[in-house]
Amino acid sequence: MERFAQRGHACFAINLRGYHDSKPVADMGNVSFDDHLEDIRTAMDALDRPVLVTHSASGLIALKLAETQPIAAAVHLVPGPPAGIFSLRGARMSLRYMPLILRGKPVLLNKRDMFDANLNRLPPDEQEAVYAKMVPAPGRQARQMMLGISVSPKKVSGPRLIQSGTDDRLTPASVHRKTARKFCSTYREYAGHGHYLMREPGWEVIADDAASWIEEHAR
């Protein structure tokens, strides 16, 4: 956000319900895909045609939102894949958490899995610091995404940029390339980067690429 602000862009972070100091929920495990979609929609309605910059699961949520709401432009860092595009690696990672996912319980990957799949390109001390701040995600939403969230390329509005890393062990770059082709997106892939590329060493290049793309394509 500071990097974008230096280029003259007003930036706002969307805090989805159930996370940290956001809107409290009685049962985090039962928060649905549509619940978080509505959170992004509400934030967009409060702003003047914002550009969305998303990471991982929120990329799929924003892509689904673009079916029904005009989007000025969207940047998706390693977005979750929609129905019809399958990540075998992601499915394997989910297996040990399947009992929680199926019962709609809060889910947080253990440290070993998180370091290997999500934070593998962060320095060890940053891995520890980032993991210490993480909170569980809703199992219900994970189950919905595993079953497949259908998104129609013909209905999706706005230009979009998908950014990925060659070393993403959670959702491989091949999956992101398929998503980019299906939704006629600009695609950029960064050598030596993984799933947490917005904080990995060299993130500045990725941020500047995104900002330049936004300045050229946002309507």
Image (spheres, rainbow, N blue to C red):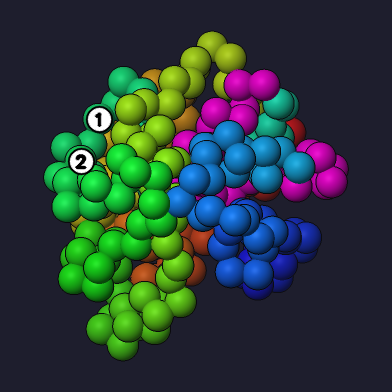
Q: Is residue 169 visible?
A: yes
Q: Relative to residue 11, is residue 131 drawn left or right? A: left
The picture places residue 101, in percent across and down from the top left corner, at 32, 45
Q: Quadrant of residue 38?
A: top right
147 versus 109 height, above or below:
above
- Foreground: disc 1 or disc 2: 2
Quadrant location of the N terminus? Answer: bottom right
Give the camera-side residue of 83 and 214. Answer: 83
The residue shown at (52%, 61%) is: 207
| Disc 2 target residue | 91
114 versus 84 height, above or below:
below
The residue shown at (25%, 73%) is: 111
| Disc 1 target residue | 86
Are circles 1 and 2 on residues that touch, CB within 8 Å?
yes
Q: Is residue 166 visible?
A: no
The picture places residue 173, in percent across and down from the top left corner, at 26, 43
Q: Relative to residue 214, is residue 9 drawn left or right? A: right
Q: Quadrant of residue 177?
A: top left
Q: Magenta segment, which residues?
A: 43-68
Which amino acid is tagged 2?
A: Ala
Quadrant location of the C terminus? Answer: top right
Q: Relative to residue 126, is residue 57 drawn left or right? A: right
Q: Residues within 10 Å of mark 2 (few under 14, many from 20)?
A: some
The residue shown at (69%, 32%) is: 71
Q: Residues within 10 Å of mark 1 (few under 14, many from 20)?
A: some
Q: Secondary structure at mark 2?
A: helix
Q: Relative to residue 31, is residue 102 drawn left or right? A: left
The residue shown at (81%, 40%) is: 45
